[in-house]
Image (cartoon, helix red, strand yellow):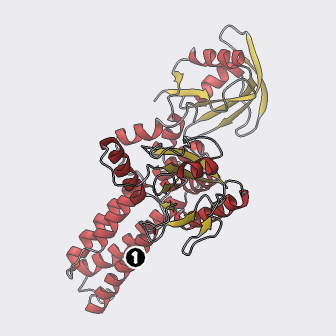
Amino acid sequence: MKTIFAVSSGRPPAAIAVVRVSGPHAFAAAQALAGPLPAPRHASLRGLRDAGGALLDRALVIVFPGPNTATGEDLVEFHCHGGRAVIAAVELALSAVAGLRPAEPGEFTRRALTNGRIDLTEAEGLADLLEAETEGQRVAAMTAAEGRVSQAVRGWMDSVAMLSAHIEAMLDFADEDDVASDSAAFDAIVAGVEALATEIETVVAAPPVERLKDGLRVVIGGPPNSGKSTLLNLLGERDAAIVSPISGTTRDRIELPVTRDGVAYVLTDTAGLIDTQDPIEAIGVTRAEDALAAADIVLWLADTPPPRSDAIWIHARADLPGRGAIPPGRAFAIAQTDRGSLDRLWAALHARAAAMLPRSDAIALKAHQRRQCRLAVDALRYPGSDALIVAEHLRQARAILAGVLGLDATGEMLDALFGRFCIGK
């Protein structure tokens, strides 16, 4: 296997740049540039020189013998000055060492996965951590990267293995006095299988992690000229939608990503809901209805009742003449001139979000992890009163759960995952 190298810190120029080297020739490469190496895991100042002896930089050198390293291989770090020319010179010197090549995106982390330092759930968590833009995304990604999802899945696999051991003992050693093989023992195993299925199902039913990244979809609906575009602009604090007294100004959906109090939202303005013979306007109405049906939260601005019982019914344009009083059924009155009314609406949105997003102390699964866990639940809940059938479905469930950890990951799956990483990670 080739030894790889790359800058693993921020893009230069910077005060310090960390160049990592990982693989079987890492120590030889470090010696070629820095001379005698320091003791493992001790930083020491060294002059880095190219093959011709020219001084490139003075840097801290740290060596990490495998397999107890980030990649599971021998690993070296050069903590250099972070100028572009310095980094370019160090990389050029490393590329001249036999057996070395520049790393590909995500290759350091991929080697950690291959060498058993992390599993697939931890690698996916690290990818999400690198892309995190909100506090909620960071917390969920850190939970996965630190192994919370992995620990849960491994715990389920251990439970399946224990149940399998009991059922196999019943099948193989039924004639032994110390192996319980009566109906009561079998019923206890079945009860344990059902309890495990319920435990997994509870985690699967929790709010998905994708909502943290994609944002909660907040759709503003109502008839033409009900204040939808104005409310979108007020919530987004910019003029994203054209506001006009002319009916039908908004003929298609307008989406505006917003982050508020560490939560990502996608605000959507929609066409006014009316009966129309205009074919283009009718398309806008259909898209508005679809958006309302798929929304996580609906803000309803009409004077007629909302199309969903969970919608937040708003009395809009409360600052206009004749609209000061709040009619029955409305949750809020919104006035363009009253900042407090918007703050109260944001507080209500945040309260709704808290119930729809994963808790910081909860295990949040990604979409493909939820699908695999559901398959495991289906395998566990397969009806049958025969011990052989129960044993086979326990085996299937364990294999499915192993897939969550990437024990059967394909090359294409890993390519897609590590393609999200930067070079040097």
Residue named by callout 1? 198
Does residue 268 sit above or below 316 in this rendering?
Answer: above
Q: Viewer-proximal residue, 416 or 177?
A: 416
Q: Please state which amino acid type lies under the numbered disc 1.
A: Thr
Left or right: 11 in relation to 119: right
Residue 1: x percent and y percent?
45, 30
The answer to which image quadrant residue 411 occupies is: top left
Left or right: 93 in relation to 224: right
The answer to which image quadrant residue 399 occupies is: bottom left
> Residue at 41% of width from left, 37% of height from top?
415
Residue 159: x percent and y percent?
41, 72
Does residue 399 sit above or below 70 in this rendering?
Answer: below
Label 1's element?
helix
Quick one: label 1, few (<14), some, or many (20+) residues within 10 Å? some
In this rendering, does residue 90 appear at all?
yes
Does residue 122 sit above or below 349 in this rendering?
Answer: above
Residue 345: x percent and y percent?
63, 62
* Residue with the most extreme top position: 52
Please give the count of numbered marks on the rendered protein: 1
* Residue with the most extreme front position: 322
Left or right: 317 in relation to 152: right
> Residue at 63% of width from left, 32% of height from top?
8
Classify the position of the C terminus by image quarter. Answer: top right
Q: Viewer-proximal residue, 207 or 316?
A: 316
